[in-house]
């Protein structure tokens, strides 16, 4: 499985950088070059604002094969930065008196939609805009025809059906728990209120006033010509067409356009226009939790009481934006790779932030050896280098996985199989290598071996819905695990994993929940008796029974760590 994890007055600003020396430090440029040269990212474009000075830096290409150099006019998916556009449009409606942040969302949704409530409290527009609605991160009724474009066929009917049948697992407004579903729903509510599509709202209220001609949900013909192709690892991947939940992450844009957007946000305190006032409102603190160590404006994350930040990611892109309104500094970083670029933005905003050295990709060396010699030579190099040059190259799990997909997509299945087998041998306790190997076996017609490896992947990560779906399509019967409410109650308690870190287990209506110190509550699902898994992250929990048959210990398995916790309550 591939690694997978958004006013009618026209402003006229001068967004062209003055003739000047670059204000982007050489250290940042060198770091960007190292990321591209070592095939961590394919292309990176940065737009940096320091008061009235604007600077751009571009490095890399629009594609690994036959690409052209990226620049400030190259088009990228900005992912969840789209949420700040959604919040700004909501703020415009509030400023104009058309909506109120305290409006319950049921006011705008069709009467046929049964909006969930909790303890007599309703979800409001502000709850959606601050991720405090208690709605989950994603709806669980998505069944995409193409998993590499997972939102393309998700419909409003499916959205309504999920909302109507979802039961909230925690109190509304109590925690901020990131929800693409909630912000996508907010974008749709803005559509219902206005009678316009979300894209039309973006164009009317933000893109046109700021002369952002390359900021759209649907690519124009001109944008297509300048599209930087998305990449998962070293492989080109599909663009994500996000329409129904477009307010959560559907926008495409350029660095040049996004600099205009960041600049307008930085200068919004002038309050000259409705858009200025709306941006001011969107920047104000709207939720703060000392327990969670989190502060939210409308969609924007507030860090250290000073910085407004939001990043984004889709299947083949990552993005990061940040602003300091006091010092009038802002940054936007876009890449056509699913590799995080937050560090670049943080470094520009906080010069003392240390940039970690980037190791060369072992996959790049292997790809050359396969081309110049053969797969056997490449595998021999990998094994020797991992022993003698372990600190020289990047040997993480995605190196072989991404390289394998490069060959699988070129129908060079035997080479892909050899790479995936090597990855399984190197990371035998990880789920994804088995999933990838299974996919290659299936493509080569070896269904029995594919089933074996999909089952192994699912055993290691029961939340791997891809493996589950493929097995079902192959008519493999998978038994659902049922744990009685009586047994679930035996797990309830507080477990101490360190001096000041606890995990609390609770049960409600036959479902089990986990909550770590300072974090939100998440449902955990049984894989077998005493063993559970999370869907929000790849993690597992195992409960241990003592000699008298009582649960007295819990073990958390996550990111290769094994963290035991003794029951203290």
Image: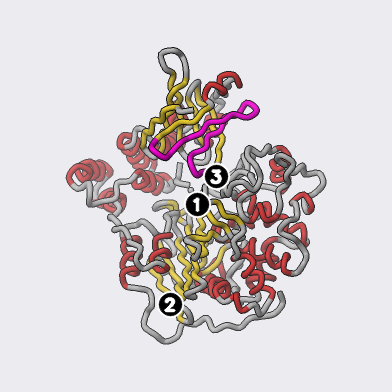
Comparing 150 with 547, the one in front is 547
Q: Pick out the residue farthest to the top.
A: 548
Which stretch is magenta?
Answer: 498-519
Q: Is residue 280 found left or right of 310 in the rendered image?
A: right
Residue under the image location 36 percent in, 56 percent down: 40
Comparing 164 with 387, the one in front is 164
Question: x and y percent of residue 376 in the render?
Answer: 25, 41
Question: x and y percent of residue 516 in the render?
Answer: 49, 39
- Give me the disc on residue 418: none
Q: Can residue 457 be seen at all in this image of the molecule?
A: no
Which secondary structure, mark 2?
A: strand
Q: Can residue 88 be seen at all in this image of the molecule?
A: yes
Q: Main secondary structure of the magenta part?
A: strand
Q: Which residue is mark 2?
A: 55
Q: Pick out the residue farthest to the right.
A: 111
The quarter of the displayed image where residue 171 is located: top right
Query: Label 2: how many residues lie within 10 Å, few (<14), some (14-19) or many (20+)?
Result: many
The quarter of the displayed image where residue 10 is located: bottom right
């Amino acid at each position: 499985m591939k690694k997978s994890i958004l006013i009618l007055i026209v402003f006229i600003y001068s967004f062209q950088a003055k003739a000047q020396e670059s204000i982007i430090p050489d250290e940042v440029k060198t770091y960007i070059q190292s990321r591209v040269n070592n095939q961590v990212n394919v292309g990176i474009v940065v737009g940096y604002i320091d008061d009235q000075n604007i600077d751009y830096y571009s490095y890399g290409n629009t594609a690994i094969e036959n690409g052209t150099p990226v620049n400030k006019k190259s088009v990228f998916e900005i992912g969840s930065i789209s949420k700040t556009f959604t919040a700004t449009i909501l703020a415009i409606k509030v400023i104009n008196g058309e909506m109120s942040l305290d409006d319950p969302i049921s006011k705008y949704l069709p009467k046929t939609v049964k909006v969930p409530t909790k303890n007599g409290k309703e979800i409001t527009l502000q709850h959606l805009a601050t991720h405090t609605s208690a709605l989950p991160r994603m709806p669980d009724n998505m069944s995409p025809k193409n998993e590499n474009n997972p939102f393309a066929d998700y419909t409003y009917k499916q959205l309504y059906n999920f909302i109507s049948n979802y039961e909230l697992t925690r109190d509304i407004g109590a925690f901020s728990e990131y929800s693409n579903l909630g912000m996508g729903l907010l974008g749709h509510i803005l559509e219902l209120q206005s009678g316009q599509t979300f894209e039309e709202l973006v164009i009317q209220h933000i893109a046109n006033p700021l002369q952002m001609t390359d900021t759209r949900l649907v690519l124009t013909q001109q944008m297509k010509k300048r599209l930087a192709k998305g990449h998962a690892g070293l492989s080109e991947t599909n663009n994500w067409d996000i329409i129904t939940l477009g307010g959560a992450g559907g926008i495409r844009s350029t660095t040049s356009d996004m600099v205009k957007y960041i600049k307008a946000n930085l200068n919004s305190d002038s309050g000259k226009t409705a858009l200025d006032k709306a941006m001011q409102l969107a920047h104000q603190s709207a939720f703060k939790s000392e327990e969670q160590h989190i502060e939210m404006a409308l969609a924007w994350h507030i860090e250290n009481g000073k910085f407004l930040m939001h990043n984004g990611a889709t299947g083949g892109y990552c993005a990061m934006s940040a602003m300091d309104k006091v010092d009038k500094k802002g940054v936007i970083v876009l890449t056509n790779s699913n590799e995080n670029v937050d560090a670049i933005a943080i470094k520009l905003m906080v010069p003392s932030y240390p940039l970690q050295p980037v190791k060369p990709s072992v996959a790049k060396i292997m790809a050359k050896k396969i081309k110049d010699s053969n797969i056997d030579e490449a595998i021999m190099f990998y094994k020797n280098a991992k022993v003698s040059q372990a600190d020289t190259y990047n040997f993480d799990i995605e190196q072989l996985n991404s390289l394998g997909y490069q060959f699988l997509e070129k129908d060079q299945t035997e080479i892909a199989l050899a790479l995936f087998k090597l990855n399984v041998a190197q990371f035998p306790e990880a789920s994804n290598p088995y999933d990838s190997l299974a996919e290659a076996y299936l493509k080569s017609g070896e269904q029995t071996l594919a089933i074996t490896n999909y089952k192994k992947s699912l055993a290691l990560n029961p939340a791997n819905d891809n493996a589950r779906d493929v097995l079902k399509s192959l008519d493999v019967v998978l038994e659902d695990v049922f744990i009685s409410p009586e047994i679930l109650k035996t797990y309830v308690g507080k477990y101490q994993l360190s001096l000041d870190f606890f995990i609390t287990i609770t049960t409600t209506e036959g479902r089990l929940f986990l909550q770590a110190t300072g974090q939100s509550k998440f449902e955990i699902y049984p894989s077998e008796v005493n063993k559970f898994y999370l869907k929000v992250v790849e993690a597992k929990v195992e409960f241990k029974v003592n000699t008298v048959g009582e649960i007295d210990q819990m073990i958390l398995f996550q990111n290769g760590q094994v963290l035991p916790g003794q029951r203290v309550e």
